[in-house]
Amino acid sequence: MKKDIKFVYFDVGGVLFRWREVLIGIAVKHKRPVDEVLRVYAKHDEAACRGIITYQKLWENMYADLGISSGKDFDFFNFSMKKFTPIIETHRFVKETAKHLPVGLLTNIHHGVYDHLRESGNIPDINYTTVVQSCLLGKVKPEKEIYHHAQKKAKVKPGNILFIDDFAINVEVAQALGWNAVLFDTDSPARSIREIRKWIKNS
């Protein structure tokens, strides 16, 4: 069915850059199951995404729960930021899309991280129409409130928005609210982008 896409929202982590490798590296280094490290990270991630705790505190809490010693005054922020890597295919696509459609970011993110991602090249350097950061709102995906806020910022109807995210639940809620949405596969960015192109081509 023909869709009239007038605004494209991209998620950030897992769509514009890879971040899970940081946690996998920690699991390997400290001989812990990857699933355990991911679970403990997720336990504290939401509070950081809501802006309740700092990025540093997130990692301190995670290490404490895992029983891992990080050493005095360890800078978790710089440690993790150096491990992030941009997904080049998506960067190119974002820049291409921004030439003919308004582009925004809708992300669950921690205080201070967005600016560093821009400076380090992990987020494409373009003029985004709007950037919705969960930590500034106190709301996180998949809560409906953050989608409603993003729609107001986009200034278009739900059916005119295309949203790309790497978490199925975030995509499903967007679709339930009338948005068009595509589930992004971090491990197969080229294939995901081909799917996204179909939506834009047919709009």
Image: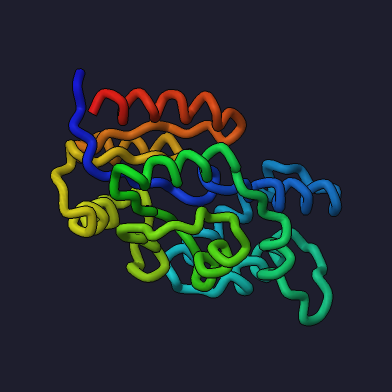
Res 195 quadrant in image: top left
Q: As drawn, is 55 to the left or to the right of 11?
A: right
Q: As drawn, is 69 to the left or to the right of 168?
A: right
Count all numbered tags in the image, as a single digit: 0
Q: Classify the position of the C terminus by image quarter.
A: top left
**Taking 136 as reference, is 72 above or below it?**
below
Res 14 quadrant in image: top right
List the single residue furthest toward the left.
157
Q: Classify the position of the N terminus by image quarter.
A: top left
List the single residue furthest toward the front.
99
List the single residue furthest toward the bottom.
73
Residue 71: x percent and y percent? 83, 75
Q: Residue at x 72, y 43 (%)?
A: 34
Q: Nearer the viewer, residue 66 or 30?
A: 30
Q: Residue at x 44, y 71 (%)?
A: 51
Residue 125: x percent and y percent? 50, 58
Q: Residue at x 56, y 37 (%)?
A: 89
Residue 52: x percent and y percent? 45, 73
Q: Residue at x 35, y 53 (%)?
A: 104
Residue 182: x percent and y percent? 38, 32
